Image (tube, rainbow, N blue to C red):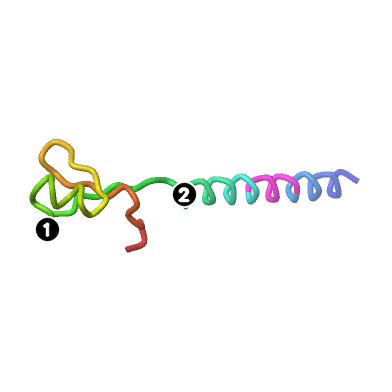
């Protein structure tokens, strides 16, 4: 009987861990990963392309982290 309880407890812990991991991965997929765009060297060119000029750099906030 104790073996059954242990098996059920381990199964529940494994499933809970998997659910938490999947939730974390789903959130990470929608996290913003800004990156600098070095070929846009002026504020005008940067903003014209729909990006943000900040501290002398052009930033793209929609960068795909798998790129």
- Structural crowding at the residue carrying mark 1, measured as other residues with C-alpha within 10 Å and reported as few (<14), some (14–19) or many (≥20): few
Q: Residue at the far right: name it.
A: 1
Residue linked to disc 1: 39
Left/right placement of residue 1 relative to residue 55 reads right
Numbered circle sitting on residue 25:
none
For marks 1 and 2, the one nearer the N-term is 2
Say which residue label 2 marks.
Answer: 30
Q: CA–CA distance between discs 1 and 2?
A: 26 Å
- Quarter of the image with the C terminus is bottom left
Towards the viewer: 56 or 4: 56
Label 1 SS = loop
Mark 2 closeness class: few <14, some 14–19, many ≥20 residues within 10 Å: few
Q: Is residue 64 left or right of residue 48?
A: right
Could you tell me residue 33's position as x and y percent?
A: 34, 48
For residue 16, side relative to residue 47 (left or right): right
Q: Residue at x 14, y 52 (%)?
A: 45
Q: Is residue 13 magenta?
A: yes
Residue drawn at point x = 86 percent, y = 43 percent: 2
The foreground one among 4 and 59 is 59
Image coordinates for residue 44, horizontal then vertical, percent: 13, 47
Whether residue 20 sits left or right of residue 9 in the image: it is left
Which tag is nearer the camera, tag 1 or tag 2? 1
Magenta region, residue range: 12-17
Percent x, y of residue 35: 25, 50
Q: Residue at x 36, y 61 (%)?
A: 66
């Amino acid at each position: 009987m104790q073996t059954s309880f242990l098996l059920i407890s381990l199964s529940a812990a494994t499933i809970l861990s998997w659910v938490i991991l999947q939730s974390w991965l789903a959130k990470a997929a929608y996290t913003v990963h800004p990156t600098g765009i070095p070929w846009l060297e002026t504020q005008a060119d940067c903003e014209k392309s729909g990006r943000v000029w900040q501290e002398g750099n052009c930033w793209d906030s929609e960068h795909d982290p798998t790129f």
